[in-house]
Image: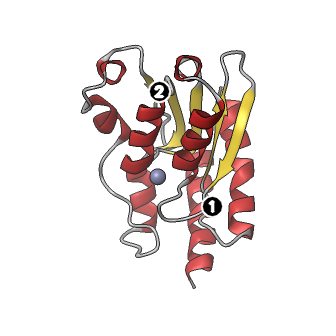
């Protein structure tokens, strides 16, 4: 599944080419196939939110429960809430939101919060959010991922200038 994080990362430069922050995500089906790819397209149209909306239009909620949203970075509260309502059953991301915040600091173009996806998912009243079947895997801040975050940050700063 970690290979899908690399695939999600391959979408990020496309977002940057179109003038958006270089964040991206993919939906992986139960047979380990990528179903939809999406890059960030705006402040309220983050990759994971757009991906969840597209998935909700394309697939029934029961099917989405068997799918995984794979994101380069931990989704923000807006995106995590959207994937929860979309009924996507699993979330995998490459680096934590706190890592992004540590790298970017208080950047006006990327106002990263300190509200992790696990807290958002665990705070809902929707039954799947509070069950152990909602799986979140966290990866440590390996050198490869730190390099990725730094690369994204550099691109984000170039866009902001
Ligand atoms: Zn987001």
> For numbered disc 1, what is the local secondary structure?
loop
Left or right: 144 in relation to 98: right
Q: Is residue 90 above or below residue 117?
A: above
Q: Are marks 1 and 2 in contact (CB under 8 Å)?
A: no
Left or right: 27 in relation to 53: right
Residue plotted at (69% across, 66% down): 16
Q: Is residue 44 above or below residue 93?
A: below
Q: Nearer the viewer, residue 125 or 48?
A: 125
Residue 19 image position (x, y, % from top left): 67, 73
Query: Sequence order check: which comes first, mark 1 or mark 2?
Result: 1
Residue plotted at (47% across, 61% down): 44
Which one is closest to the eye, mark 1 or mark 2? 2
Q: Is residue 97 above or below residue 32?
A: below
Residue 142 seen:
no
Residue 115 image position (x, y, % from top left): 30, 48
Q: Nearer the viewer, residue 134 or 100?
A: 134
Label 2 belongs to which residue?
87
Q: CA distance from mark 1 to mark 2?
A: 25 Å
Residue plotted at (63% across, 27% down): 59
What is the quadrant of residue 149 in the picture?
bottom right
Label 1 belongs to which residue?
22
């Amino acid at each position: 599944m970690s290979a899908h994080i690399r695939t999600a990362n391959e979408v990020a430069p496309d977002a940057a080419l179109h003038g958006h922050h270089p964040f991206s995500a993919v939906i992986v089906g139960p047979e380990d196939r990528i179903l939809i790819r999406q890059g960030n397209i705006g402040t309220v149209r983050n990759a994971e939110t757009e991906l969840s909306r597209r998935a909700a239009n394309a697939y029934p909620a029961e099917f989405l429960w068997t799918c995984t949203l794979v994101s380069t970075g931990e989704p923000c509260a807006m995106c995590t809430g959207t994937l929860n309502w979309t009924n996507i059953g699993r979330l995998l991301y490459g680096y934590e939101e706190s890592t992004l915040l540590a790298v970017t600091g208080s950047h006006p173009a990327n106002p990263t919060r300190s509200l992790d996806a696990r807290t958002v998912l665990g705070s809902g009243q929707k039954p799947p959010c509070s069950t152990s079947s909602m799986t979140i895997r966290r990866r440590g801040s390996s050198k490869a991922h730190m390099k990725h975050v730094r690369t994204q940050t550099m691109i984000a700063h170039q866009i902001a200038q």
